[in-house]
Image: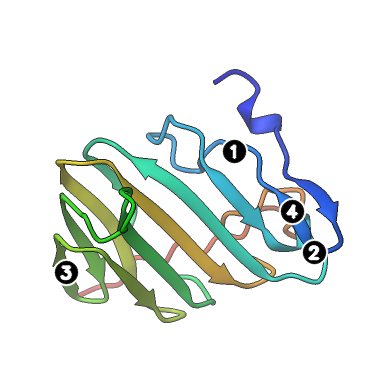
Amino acid sequence: MAGMDKLKNVLREPNVVELKPWKSIHKTIKEPMITGLGPMDIPESALAMGFARITKPDSLGNPTHKHPFDQWIYLIGESKNFVDFDADIEFTLGDEIIKIDYPCYVFVPKNTMHCPLDIKRVGKPFIFIDVSITQEASVRPKKLAKGGRPKYIAKKTKK
C-alpha cells in the first residue's frame, strides 16, 4: 500500500488513540496492521502492541535473537470467539521448538533466545499480536530510539 509507512495514529482525547493502518516491520506481511507505539502515541505509555492478520505461511522474527525486555506473542483465531484457530506453527523459544496448533500466547522472558515463528500452514487467517512493555521496543521507529533502532541480535556462540 503506497504511503502506508507514513500513516500515524491520532490522539483523539487524553489517553485515547485512534488506530491507523501501519506497515509491518515484517516485510513479508503485506496487509496493513495496527500498532500502538506507547510513547509515540502517549508519552507516559511504555506498552507497544502490534496486531497483524496472517493469511499464509511465513517465517517471522529471523534470525533467532534476544532483547532486554519481556515480550508476549499472541496467536488467536480471527472469528467471533477467537478460539477458532486453524494453523500449524513452530516457535523457537530457548533450546526448544514449540509446535502450536491452538490459540495461545507465548511469554518470552527478557534475554531469552527466540524465533523464528515459522507459520507452516494457515487453514484460516489468524491474528498475530506482539506485545512488549519498554521504551525501547524493537518495533519503534528509528527516530524514537536514542541512537537509532536498538540492535538486540545475539552473536553466535561456539558449541
* Amino acid at the residue labelled 4: Val
Q: Residue 15 carries which label?
A: 2
Q: What element carries label 2?
A: loop
Residue at image mark 3: 98
Judge by depth and name the residue closer to the eye, 63 or 86: 86
* Amino acid at the residue labelled 1: Trp
* Amino acid at the residue labelled 2: Asn
> Tag 2 or tag 1, which sits nearer the N-term?
2
Residue at image mark 4: 17
Q: Which mark is residue 22?
A: 1
Q: Residue 33 carries which label?
A: none
> Tag 4 or tag 3, which sits nearer the N-term?
4
Task: Mark 1 vs mark 2: give the one in front.
Answer: 2
* Amino acid at the residue labelled 3: Ile
Q: In which quarter of the image is the N terminus?
A: top right
- Horizontal and vertical percent for residue 56? 24, 35
